[in-house]
Image (tube, grey):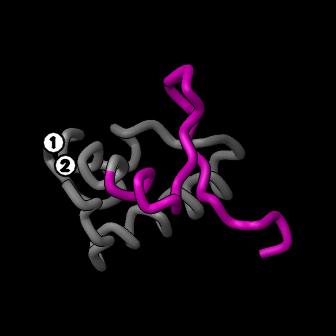
Amino acid sequence: MAAQSVRPRDLEVVAAIDALTAELGYSPTVRELASRLGYKAPQSVQRRLDRLVAAGLVRRPLARRLRALATARPSGD
C-alpha cells in the first residue's frame, strides 16, 4: 500500500504543533492539538499525525511519550 499524501488540513497540524510548542515551551499533547484545531475527537488528530510521520514532516520517538511531537524542520528555520 502506498503512503497517503499529505493534505492541506494535515499541514495545519504542523503549524499548530509549532505554535503550541512556542507558546508552551514544550510539545503539545494530541488533546491539546485537537482543542487548538477545533476537533471533537483526538483520533482525528492522531490520523493526521500518523500521515505526517509517514511523510517525514513530524517526528515521534519510538517511546511514545505524551509530549514527544516535533516538526521535522532544520533548527535554523
Q: Residue at x 36, y 50 (%)?
A: 49
Q: Is residue 61 above or below residue 14?
A: above
- Label 2: how many residues lie within 10 Å, few (<14), some (14-19) or many (20+)? few
Q: Which residue is mark 1?
A: 41
Mark 2 element type:
helix
Q: Which image quarter: residue 27?
A: top right
Q: Is residue 58 above or below residue 5?
A: above
Between 63 and 34, the residue placed more toward the observer is 63
Q: Residue at x 55, y 55 (%)?
A: 20
- Left or right of 11, for residue 65: right
- Left or right of 7, for residue 20: right
Going by the picture, which residue comes out furthest to the front? 1
Q: Position of residue 36 (x, y in %)?
A: 36, 56
Q: Amino acid at mark 1?
A: Ala
Between 39 and 49, the residue placed more toward the observer is 49
Going by the picture, which residue comes out furthest to the bottom? 8
Q: Quadrant of the C terminus?
A: bottom right
Q: Position of residue 47 (x, y in %)?
A: 24, 48
- Left or right of 72, for residue 35: left
Q: Which residues are magenta?
A: 51-77
